Image (tube, rainbow, N blue to C red):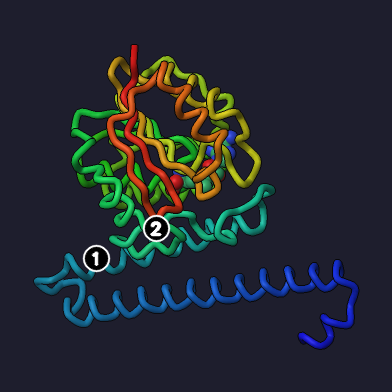
Amino acid sequence: MLTVLLKLPRRIAGKIRNVYVIAVKKMKLTFAFNLHRFALYLRVKSCRLLSGGEKSPQAASYEFSNNLLTLHKKIYNLLLLQRNHYKHYAYFSGYPYQSLGILNVFGDRGTEERFEAYELAKWIKSSDTILDIGCNCGFMSIFTSFRTGCSAEGIDINPYMISIGNEVAAYLNLSDKVKLITGDFKEFKCAKIYSVIFSFATHWTDDKNYRVSLDEHFSKLHTLLQSNGLLVFESHYNDVGQESFYDSINRSSELFRIEEKKILENGCREFYYMRKID
Ligand SMILES: C[S@@+](CC[C@H](N)C(=O)[O-])C[C@H]1O[C@@H](n2cnc3c(N)ncnc32)[C@H](O)[C@@H]1O
């Protein structure tokens, strides 16, 4: 392979190399996804072995494993639909951007790990109402509601990720507390205001469906927050070290007071708790 590439003009060799790297990445992901499904199958099998069937005293664990398989079938079908019909860029080669360990949902970024790293249990109260922008499957909101009892609304432009989120919220009996809708945040208008906003890795998006200036983003979030409300903001890798990013953060001091800043993922991401100034 290498000797063939060396003989080709540099531009063509570069393109072939890129196609090769992408194909290998996709193969690895497909393999990981199927390993994950197999692990789920083993988990369900072991649950059934222990429960001894529908009428046994441990029937609850039998029912749990049956329901989990049904949920995963629905998720699998939604991912297939996305692969065949979604016209935009799909993150993580079409698998969810977020994983959810408690229900074995495969994805790129661990929800439970993020919940701990962001110390959300310390910042979110059961009386809070969260708006989660570009929420993907909404797992950050779902898990935060699961752990703290808060209510949440999430919006994402990808209808397949939203459907997965709504299935998971229903599975966890959280449909009354967590509402996820498909929509474009650029068009989002709401009579309601929120006590907390999650803006996680979403102030500009790789799929190019959301490209506004960070100043504009902060101004809009300011109008959607209640007095003294909390903006929980996560950067992208590419923001770190960018002068324009810090200029915008500094300008936002007219709208928000930074209460805490964290450096995460070995210095690759920044994380801010920002309190609304009225
Ligand atoms: C990098 S992911 C971040 C997902 C989530 N906030 C998180 O951190 O786990 C960006 C998300 O924004 C969504 N998105 C992109 N443009 C959008 C828009 N105009 N309105 C709503 N969601 C959008 C994408 O579909 C994707 O799920």
Per the model, the C-alpha gap separating discs 2 and 1 is 41 Å
Residue identifier under label 1 = 63
Q: Residues within 10 Å of mark 2 (few under 14, many from 20)?
A: few
Q: Is residue 159 visible?
A: no
Rendered-image quadrant of the N terminus? bottom right
Residue that appears at 22% across and 70% down: 62
Badge nearest the viewer, 2 or 1? 2
Q: Secondary structure at mark 2?
A: loop
Left or right of 230, for residue 210 = right
Residue 46 occupies quadrant: bottom left
Residue that appears at 67% across and 72% down: 21
Left or right of 252, for residue 4 = right
Mark 1 lies within 8 Å of ligand 1 (Cβ measured):
no
Ranked by sequence position, the earlier of labels 2 and 1 is 1
Q: Position of residue 244 (x, y in %)?
A: 57, 33
Q: Secondary structure at mark 1?
A: helix
Which amino acid, mark 1? Answer: Glu
Name the residue nearer the viewer: 129 or 201: 201
Q: Which mark is residue 266?
A: 2
Check if mark 2's residue and mark 1's residue have beta carbons within 8 Å.
no
Name the residue nearer the viewer: 127 or 19: 19
Residue 45 occupies quadrant: bottom left
Name the residue nearer the viewer: 206 or 41: 206
Which amino acid, mark 2? Answer: Asn
Left or right of 272, for residue 91 = right
Residue that appears at 31% across and 67% down: 66
